[in-house]
Image: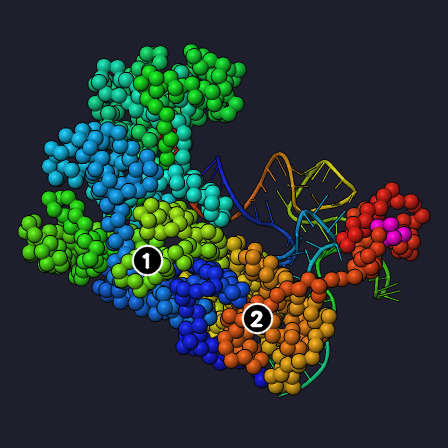
Amino acid sequence: MEYNFREIEANWQKYWADNQTFKATNKSDKPKFYVLDMFPYPSGAGLHVGHPLGYIASDIYARYKRHKGYNVLHPQGYDSFGLPAEQYAIQTGQHPAITTEANIATYRKQLDKIGFSFDWSREVRTSDPTYYKWTQWIFIQLFNSWYNKTSDKAEDISTLISIFEVEGNAAVKAACDDEITIFSADDWKNYSEEEKQHILLKYRLTFLSETEVNWCPALGTVLANDEIVNGVSERGGHTVVRKKMMQWSMRITAYAQRLLDGLAKIDWPQPLKDSQTYWIGRSEGAMVSFNIDGFEDKIDVFTTRPDTIFGVSFMTLAPEHELVTKITTTEQKEAVEAYVKATAKRSELERMADVKTISGVFTGAYALHPFTGEKVQIWIGDYVLAGYGTGAVMAVPCGDDRDYAFAKHFGIEIINIFEDVDISEEAFTDKENSVIANSDFLNGLPYKKAMKTIIYEIEKRGFGYGKINYRLRDAVFSRQRYWGEPFPVYYKNGLPQMIDKQYLPIVLPEVEKYLPTEDGKPPLGNATTWAWDTVKNAVVSNELINNETVFPLELNTMPGWAGSSSYFNRYMDPENTEEFVSKEAVEYWQDVDLYIGGSEHATGHLLYSRFWQKFLFDKGILPVDEYAKKLINQGMITGTSAFVYRVEGENKFVSKGLIGDLKVQPIHSDVSFVNASDELDIEAFKNWREEYKDAEFVLEDGKYIVGREVEKMSKSKYNVVNPDQICEEYGADSLRLFEMFLGPLEQSKPWKTSGISGVYSFLKKLWKLYIVDGEFSVSDENPTPEELKTLHKTIKKVEEDIANFSFNTSVSTFMIAVNELTALKCNKRAILEPLAIIIEPYAPHIAEELWKNLGHTTSISTADFPVFKPEYLVENSKEYPVSFNGKMRFKIELPLNLSIKEIEEIVMTHEKTQEQLQGKTPKKVIIVPGKIINIVG
RNA sequence: GCAGAAGUGGUGGAAUUGGUAGACACGCUGGACUUAAAAUCCAGUGGGCAGUAAUGCUCGUGCGGGUUCAAGUCCCGCCUUCUGUACCA
């Protein structure tokens, strides 16, 4: 009876599917456990061996938890809206839905081969109308809500209207647009319905506004900051420019503080928390208004150092600042205009590459210092960003590096307002250790006291107020793309109207072309049936638009992160057509206990989804405001590329060891042509490409040895390894074990297929334990203490490893156990049965097969995990290492019940000790019972 | 620049609280089986020196210091690589 993994794995995969072994119920007496993977975008390239790493880890965890008596929810689905399918559609005319469907089929086939314990009955796809119905629904909920800073939560817009009706908006504390006009209750009542809607739009949690966006002309779309890499689009590398557009935005800034505070109660990796903290970017300071000499207008600035206000010697505005044209003097007009123009022209790329250059222009205007009344020059400079704070800064050169450099460069006065600090060479930025001087009533105060005093004074004198500012921006939610969720929105007199829940989903219309229209409208502008009939409550032909009962629908679609921001809640109740998720389901499952995925989502998906969770929590739809208790980032698996070396100018390849002084050009070879010893299959390489057919190969010892280098796994580097091939050749159990064996889950590590033979032969050795004379057979004899010891130390170690997500060391532990049991010729049921269970999470197929052969008729998947018994590991002697001055010289076997004194006596009289000491008396003897003996000479 | 992670044999990596550095594998070398190959099994395998050998000595966890009876692990100062981020007032 051979270990025939092909037959075994196919049989069990069929069994699991037929019996719905891993289907989770929403009702159970067992405690719940929710294990989630970040769901994949089904790309056309399919999975490579790097992708399943996290899925294998989570699957091990899920399977382990089933053995421990939990009702485990372990779903999987697809984030199936996205740009690649759309790009492909633009090129070929094929509908993205067809491409997506085909890609999903490939993914599913590949995933099935690895033997995951997913509950596929709960699968969701973000591009499926029955799913995106709920994405649209959440959008409507956000539209119908405002953020009340007094109650510190989102509330229905009707509560805001009630306040307006009673007292106007003066006292309302809300997260809203910056420019809000104050109105009274009477004003409100006199506003037209349209005016009211315009005002409410400034308060809603999703709102329309003219935003400066990253417009990519080549893709015909707006890109998020994280979709831009080095100033060009992440996909395709096209140029990106700044442009103003009417866009939907999400008021995530309302949640800035809560997103920050929530980090304290979730067990997520510190680096990930740090990057979210940085992204949110909380800073405490003050808003201060500066009057402008000769103008009514004021310049508002946000500063984190109001305590240094007496050090202000100039102000800098962003070139885009609205006051620039107004206040610039005639003498400076030309220079200012040229500078503004030059800045607008500079691409993001240029601005980034050139951080060191100091540039700016004096406007000729002066601000008046609020405390001293002195005149302060107003400059413009592109180091001040229009999008942050107020787009203006009060410059304090003595306390800020950039202001210092700017002042030095343009010869502006530098006022020192720090006690006993020399600022002739550089600014003094150590705020914690600063003591203010030369600053009127702040003199002699340390940082913290100075801050308190100045904010009090600023507020008292009406120059401004203390403020907490966040770097986090509201998230633009519109995309000029086809393959995304349509908005459930139509426009009446230019005002957005939500479509009622009962008519959802609004299904993506058919279009002839997936490109933007000729007049620059998004691709949905090509649709001919894309109008909303408010009588029939249906999508109808555009020809029927009369702006009385039939209105145009929104042409933008939602961004990639829309569908992924709450999908984990939908898994709890995926077939519910009446509610996003039922109360019972969400009360039972609550939240994700373990979430595994890549760290690249740190500030995108993982921040937006926390925002939506908090919002839905505020609305009473979800019971918890953080959705994932624990999160693990799996590391990247890199590829090991292979290189052949072509002699420059010739069609001749030299083996790596023979390069010497030759001028050679390294060329990627497909890794499949190279064996474990780095030898190239020359014939395969020659047949790869026409140009290599007649190439000459210079060999060493009769072989061609390639060079190897670790690089990102990618098609273009010919180092991609496909999991299907591995499953075909070694089996899914080998793949699973090997992916884990590679190294710590959270670190990046290179893939080298040759190593897999180690885990493969381990599985064969494991199999053999259960075989006697070619037949499956185990003995019912009582196990020996040695056998029990091996079993129980394995149970102990594996449970500790799983708790620490240290799956690599578990695999080693299994190997050691099997090696030991093989040496002991152990064939006892009492050992081999529990062994099968503890290996099951890692190698489920072979475990099921062994379990069946042990006489069981049901799946091993819910068998109780064996209980660790420490008594089997009790030792009564220890092989002590005996060190001299910290260096181990020999070992000595001693009973563990000896006292320190007794140990010392035995050790000191030992002949090897005498040999080491050579008659000298040791200064000190250190004995740690059970650990070590160290003799200091 | 800032933030984070990581540097251990030819390779992937292991080493609970400081306590035998290199577990477990890959690769390599030698051997068994075989007409041969594959598969399988056995033995060896960090470097250097000495010895026929058993063995002994010595150096060794990126570099330089320090604490300690004892440091891969703790402290101080550097170097390198990878990842993220981009003038945030």
Upstream in sequence: badge 2 or badge 1: 1
Write the start and end of the magenta stretch as one range: A900-905
Residue A528 seen in the current view:
no
Mark 2 vs 1: CB contact within 8 A? no
A802 relative to A174 in the view: left or right: right
* Label 1 sits on residue: A581
- Secondary structure, mark 2, is helix
- Within 10 angstroms of label 2, few (less than 14), some, or many (20 or more) residues? many
Q: The numbered mark 1 sits on a residue in which chain?
A: A
Q: Identify the mark at residue A837; answer none if there is no mark.
A: 2
Residue A151 seen in the current view:
yes
The disc labelled 2 sits on which kind of residue? Ile
Write the residue at 26% across / 49% down: A141
- Colouring rule applied to residues: rainbow
- Secondary structure, mark 1, is loop
Write the residue at 35% across / 11% down: A372
A869 relative to A271 in the view: left or right: right
Give the quadrant of the C terminus of chain A. top right
Identify which residue, A542 or A284, lies in the foreground. A284
B28 relative to A900 in the view: left or right: left
Question: Percent from the top left, x then y, of residue A265?
Answer: 47, 45
The disc labelled 1 sits on which kind of residue? Val
Q: The numbered mark 2 sits on a residue in which chain?
A: A
State the predominant SS element of the stretch in magenta: helix
Q: Which residue lies furthest to the front in this view?
A: A29
Q: How far apart are marks 2 and 1 (CA)?
A: 35 Å
Question: Percent from the top left, x then y, of residue A559?
Answer: 29, 51
Write the residue at 10% across / 44% down: A493
Q: Identify the mark at residue A660; answer none if there is no mark.
A: none
Using the image, determine if residue A395 lies above or below residue A185. above
